[in-house]
Image (cartoon, rainbow, N blue to C red):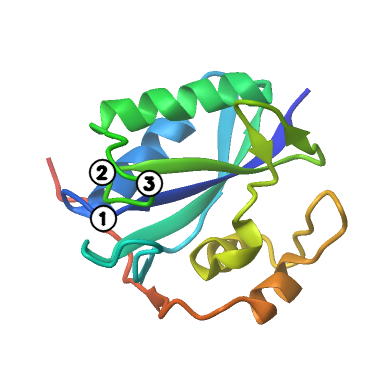
Amino acid sequence: MKTDAFIGLGSNLENPAAQLARAVAELAALPGTVLVAQSPFYASRPVGPQDQPDFVNGAVWLSTTLPPHSLLDHLQRVEQLHGRERLRHWGPRTLDLDLLIFGTQTINDERLTVPHPELSNRDFVLQPLLDLSPDLTLPDGASVAELRRRCQDNHLRKLPPVTRKPG
């Protein structure tokens, strides 16, 4: 059975937009998974320590047969391929992939919390989700559009599309 999964993407190191574009292609190639849609990318100030570059964020909508924890394992492998190091909480990173929503499931265990616990506080997560699905709701029925209207502004700036160079 296929499940709709929404993944948040973020980077602020080593050409962040290119990191995200590469990650989108890698997510589309996961086993049992189809890329339904990709949001535009947005730039925003970092959450947490301000002594780091601005972030580039986006989201993808996947249709997958992978169970949630297996999908999480794949996301973490893709992060590692991008050289992700967890040196500081909310610190700079080459790639951050978050499982935001997994169908209508609510998960809260030692490895995974879905919906993502900070989703409603992050305009750089909510806006890309709205770009993917304007009528999207969380498993508890909360409207992503309403959460976005109430969310604090983080100076979100829509970026032009990433174009791939020939060759």
Q: Secondary structure at mark 3?
A: loop
Relative to 16, does residue 24 appear above or below in the rendering? Answer: above
| Distance from the alpha carbon under mark 2 to that under mark 1 | 6 Å
Q: Nearer the viewer, residue 91 or 144?
A: 91
Helix, strand or loop at mark 2? loop
Under mark 3, the amino acid is: His
146 shown above or below 91: below
> How many residues crowd mark 1 within 10 Å: few (<14), some (14–19), many (20+)?
many
The residue pinned by badge 2 equals 94
Residue 101 versus residue 150: which sits nearer the camera?
150
Report the front residue among 56 and 25: 56
For mark 3, what is the residue?
89
Rendering coords of residue 10 (x, y %): 38, 52
Seen at 53% across and 18% down, the residue is 31
Instruction: For the N terminus, give its image quadrant.
Output: top right
Q: Earlier in the sequence, mark 3 or mark 1?
A: 1
Q: Is residue 29 visible?
A: no
Task: Name the N-terminal-most of marks 3 and 2.
Answer: 3
Residue 44 placed where, x, y %?
Answer: 36, 71
Asked if residue 156 lies left or right of residue 126, the reply is left
Q: Residues within 10 Å of mark 2 (few under 14, many from 20)?
A: many
**Distance between the alpha carbons at the discs numbered 3 and 2:** 14 Å
Q: In terms of image quadrants, where is residue 133?
A: bottom right
Labels 3 & 1 near each other (Cβ < 8 A): no
Residue 12 badge = 1
Work out how far the residue at label 3 is from the one at label 1, CA to CA, in angstroms: 14 Å
Percent x, y of residue 21: 32, 47
**SS label for mark 1:** loop
Direction from residue 97 to residue 165 in the image, left or right: left
